[in-house]
Image (cartoon, rainbow, N blue to C red):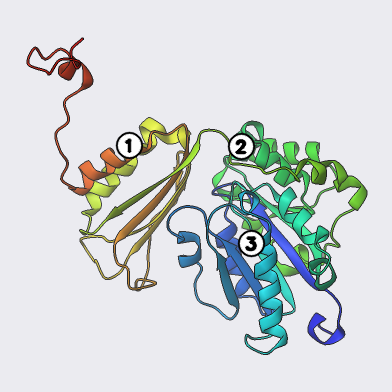
Amino acid sequence: MSALNSGRPIPLTVLTGFLGAGKTTLLNQLLRDPALSGTLVLVNEFGEIGLDHLLIEQVDGDVVALAGGCLCCQVRSDLIDTLEDLLRRRDEGEIPAFDRVVLETTGLADPVPVIHSLIAHPYISLRFALDGVVTLVDAVNGFRTLNEFEEARRQLYLADAVVLTKSDLADAATRAAIEAEIRRVKPELPVLDAARGEAVPANLFGLGGHDAENLKPWLAAGTETSAHDDGVKTTTLWSDAALPPTSFGMFIDLLRSEHGAKILRLKGLLRMADDPDRPVVVHGVQHLFHPPRRLDAWPDEDTRTRIVVIGKHLDADLVRRLYDAFAGVPGLDAPDRSALLDNPLAPPGMRR
C-alpha cells in the first residue's frame, strides 16, 4: 500500500554528492525505472542559470526546481514552504499524486541543515519520513575532494549508502584508494558501483533513515547559518553568436591546462556554428571533461550559449576575458595600471 492511501508519512530520500559527482546523470537513469513511478523529484539549482534542471530530460515524473542557490544557504522556510505547498496541491488534486520524494542537493550543500529542517518541523516531520541519504562520490576526484572540502566529508559522514561514480574512468590504484577511504570513514556503509549497475532503486531506497543519537552532534552544528567554502564562486558565461567548434575546443583546452585544478565544475549548453539548432552539452570536473553530447533540440526558447563555471580561487574576470576572446566577443582595449600611472600627461592625482 502506498503512502498516499495508507496515511503513512511519505518517504523522502536526500541525494547528495560533491560538484560533478553525477547526481543529474543518476537521476535521469532512476526516473526511467518503473520502480520510481509516482516519485516527485525536487531539484536544487546553483548559479544564475538552472542548467541542472534543463539537463534533466522529460520522463514520467514531476520535477520541481528550487531556484536561488544552495539549500544549506537558504532560509529553511524555502524548503519547508515548498513541501507544504506540494502537499496541499497533492491533497487537493491539483497535481498528480506522489508517494515518494527524492531531494537533490547541490554539490556544495551541507546535508545537515536539510535533514534538520525535515525532522525538526512539527508538520513536515509528520507528513514526511527521512528514508535515507544517498551520497555520490566521484572515483576519479573523490579522494582529493574528501581531503579538501568539509562539505564533501559531511556528505559522506551522513550517508546511508554511497554510490561510487566514474569508476570506469579511474585506474585500479585510484579506485582502490577511494574505496578504502570511504570504508575508513564509514566501515559499515554499503558502497554501490554505478558503472557496474548497482545504483538501482532497490539499493537506494528503503534505507530506514537515521539514528537520531548519532546525528545529534551534526545537527547541533547545522543550526547555524552555513555558507559555501571560502573562495568558491560561480562564473556565468553567455553569448548569442554560434561558436566555431575549434574555438570552443581551444578555450576548454587552455582553461583546463592552466586552471583545471581550480575548476570544481563546468557545465553548459552550447550553440555551435556547425549545427546551431542542436545544442551541445558539455560538463567537466577539474581536469576531467566528458565527451560533448549533441541534443536533438534546445530544451527551451533560449538558444544562447550558456556556461556555468564553479571554481575555487578562480578569477572570474580572467575566465570571462578568455571566453570572450575565443567566442569573438568584442572588448575594449584596457591599458595596464602601470602605463596609466607612469603617463606624464595623466591628470594630477593619478601619477605615481
Judged by depth in the image, the label closer to the viewer, 3 or 1, is 3
N-terminal of the two: label 2 or label 3?
3
Which residue is identified by label 3? 78
Q: Are marks 3 and 1 in contact (CB under 8 Å)?
A: no
For residue 284, the mark is none
N-terminal of the two: label 2 or label 1?
2
Residue positioned 32% across, 35% down in the render? 318
Which residue is identified by label 2? 145
N-terminal of the two: label 3 or label 1?
3
Image location of residue 211, percent across then percent down: 90, 53
Q: Secondary structure at mark 1?
A: helix
Between residues 38 and 343, which one lies in front from this camera angle?
A: 343
Amino acid on which the number 2 mark rests in the picture? Thr
Q: Residue furthest top?
A: 352
Residue positioned 59% across, 53% down in the render? 106
Amino acid on which the number 3 mark rests in the picture? Asp
Residue positioned 11% across, 18% down in the render? 346
In the image, taking residue 136 as reference, residue 170 lies left or right, namely left
Judged by depth in the image, the label closer to the viewer, 2 or 1, is 1
Which residue is identified by label 1? 317
Residue positioned 67% across, 36% down in the render? 150
Image location of residue 230, percent across then percent down: 56, 33
Q: Are marks 2 and 3 in contact (CB under 8 Å)?
A: no
